[in-house]
């Protein structure tokens, strides 16, 4: 059964895409910890990030790096935090989150409730810096 991320990749579920190419995609987390919280993943459905072959893994990190620069430009912050948890969706992915403190990366924090209009505005804002 395809993961929710595969359904997003296949445009079966709408998303707030930031960027994509033949192998990778980035879109906003719809339950973000902070505005600008994005996900980056390979299009190939592989559950565990360390099961990616070396080329796909390195490409994922390179793609994520590019997205992180755009997020930081759109949402000035101390750093872009990167997290790989991998339990919530069985499809390897990276969280990129604008942070100013360690607590900003706490996934037990209350998630923001942004409207579709706010998410669309955020995605467009990030895209302007790619």
Image: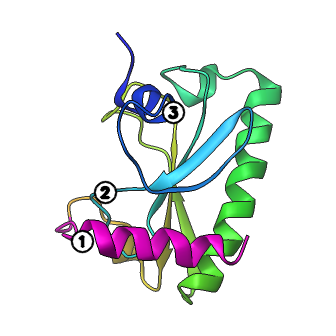
Q: Quadrant of residue 54?
A: top right
- The mark nearer the N terminus, 2 or 3, is 3
The residue lying toward the viewer, choosing from 6 and 42, is 6
Q: Please identify the quadrant where the C terminus is shown.
A: bottom right
Q: What quarter of the picture does the N terminus occupy?
A: top left
Query: Is the Cβ of the residue at disc 2 closer than 8 Å to that at disc 1?
Result: yes
Question: Residue 70, percent across and down?
Answer: 67, 73
Q: Which residues are magenta?
A: 109-130
> What distance separates the C-alpha of mark 3 from that of mark 1?
22 Å
To which residue does mark 2 refer?
Answer: 30
Magenta stretch holds residue 106: no
Would you call the spot at circle 2 few (<14 residues within 10 Å), some (14-19), or many (20 or more)? some
Q: Quadrant of residue 105?
A: bottom left
Label 2 vs label 1: CA separation? Answer: 8 Å
Question: What's the residue at 37%, 23% (across, down)?
Answer: 3
Work out which residue is located at the far right of the displayed protein and give it.
55
Identify the secondary structure beneath mark 3. helix
Nearest the eye: 129 or 103: 129
Give x and y (percent) for residue 30.
Answer: 31, 57
Crowding at mark 1 (Cα within 10 Å: few <14, some 14-19, many 20+)? some
Residue that appears at 32% across and 76% down? 118
Q: Which residue is denoted by mark 3 in the rendering?
A: 9
């Amino acid at each position: 059964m395809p993961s929710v991320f595969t359904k997003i990749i296949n445009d079966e579920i709408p998303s707030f895409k930031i960027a994509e190419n033949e192998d990778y995609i980035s879109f906003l987390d719809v339950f973000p910890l902070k505005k600008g919280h994005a996900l980056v993943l390979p299009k190939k459905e592989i559950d565990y990030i360390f099961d990616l072959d070396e080329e796909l893994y390195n490409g994922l990190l390179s793609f994520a790096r590019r997205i992180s620069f755009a997020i930081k430009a759109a949402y000035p912050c101390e750093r872009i935090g990167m997290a790989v948890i991998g339990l919530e969706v069985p499809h390897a992915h990276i969280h990129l989150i604008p942070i100013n403190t360690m607590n900003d990366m706490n996934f037990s924090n209350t998630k923001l409730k942004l409207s579709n209009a706010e998410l669309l505005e955020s995605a467009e804002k990030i895209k302007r810096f790619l």
